[in-house]
Amino acid sequence: MPPLSAPAPTFLWRIATRVPPQALAAFEAALEPFCMAISTQMLDSDDDGSLWNIEGFSDAEPDEQAILRALAKTARSNGIPPPPAKIDLVPPKDWVAGNLADFPPIAVGRYFIHGTHFDGKPPAGAMALKLDAGPAFGSGEHPSTAGCLTVLDQLARRHQFRNMLDMGCGSGILTIAMAKTWRVPLVACDIDDEAARVTAANAVRNGVGNLVRACFGPSYRTPDVAKARPYDLIVANILARPLRVMAGDLACALAPGGVTVLSGLLKRDARLVLNAHRDRGLTLVRTVLIGDWATIVMRK
């Protein structure tokens, strides 16, 4: 795999607010149209009670008034006062490497996910995934990532895939899981060049760098992605709206009989995502629910 070019400094706009846990999913959905990625974190109980911190990231200056209106509408729907929001520009930096996620080890099915700071021993028989992730890319703690790992564990019991795609690869956690599980070359793609770089680095760190071609570009129109189609497995852990928009492109890139795993969506948005792909000739295999989040498995 040729090395990626050195990235330019990355400016990001950050939208931050704090909400009670019962309204977390609603506010995540409210911010989704304005953000390319969303991160959530439970605050310490002795700090702000049971509040959750939500941070949305955008590579373009967000519409502050539209965001405030969306937050106010969501607050009214949930019977709470509008939460204060802070919108600021994150200074240019290597924000993935500079904000390594100090997350505890996580076990999902056969997978054991841990950071580079972990000096313990993975459980016997577990497939270890070692990575450090940035704040917007995920480390396996989010239910959408856990849902994808759960499905990959289930698929591995019955399927041998030979040509795979991780669309919206982020930190590369799902890319690495796919490469280690099936041991065949695969493509990982993200619209963010730094995500592609992190995925490539994490693949090397996990001993599967020779299997992973990480690239960045306009999703399914990225040359490396288009060249390698059709795929017999496509994993897309993104957000509900882009999943619906890209349903047609996904269907064209998926081989007959191929399987897709769709995640990054709330349960209440699952029907919309499901119908968008059904309209393109895909059929439902099963849905995995973790909390308020859904992971959909479909077949062409």
Image (cartoon, rainbow, N blue to C red):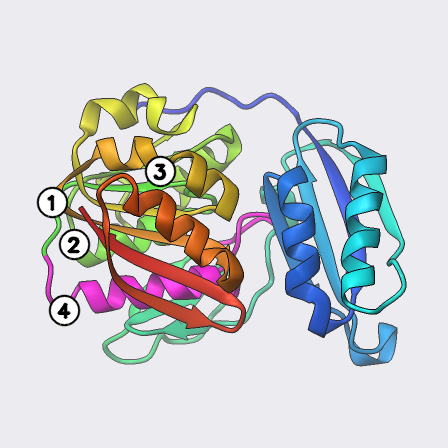
Indicate which disc residue 247 carries.
3
Q: Residue at x 30, y 19 (%)?
A: 223
In the rendered structure, the answer to whether residue 15 lies left or right of residue 96 reads right
Indicate which disc residue 278 carries.
none
**Residue indicated by mark 4:** 157
Residues under numbered marks 1 and 4 in contact, where contact means CB atoms less than 8 Å apart: no
C-alpha span from label 2 to label 1: 8 Å
Q: Quadrant of the N terminus?
A: top left
Q: Which residues are magenta?
A: 132-159
Q: Secondary structure at mark 1?
A: loop
Q: Nearer the viewer, mark 2 or mark 1?
A: 1
Residues under numbered marks 4 and 2 in contact, where contact means CB atoms less than 8 Å apart: no
Q: Nearer the viewer, mark 1 or mark 3?
A: 3
Q: What amino acid type should be assigned to the residue bearing mark 4? A: Arg
Q: Which numbered disc, 2 or 1, marks the residue that appears first in the sequence?
A: 1
Q: Nearer the viewer, mark 4 or mark 3?
A: 3
Q: What amino acid type should be assigned to the residue bearing mark 3? A: Ala
**Residue indicated by mark 2:** 182
Q: Which numbered disc, 3 or 2, marks the residue that appears first in the sequence?
A: 2
**Residue indicated by mark 1:** 162
Residues under numbered marks 2 and 1 in contact, where contact means CB atoms less than 8 Å apart: yes
Q: Nearer the viewer, residue 71 or 176?
A: 71
Q: Position of residue 233 (x, y in %)?
A: 21, 47
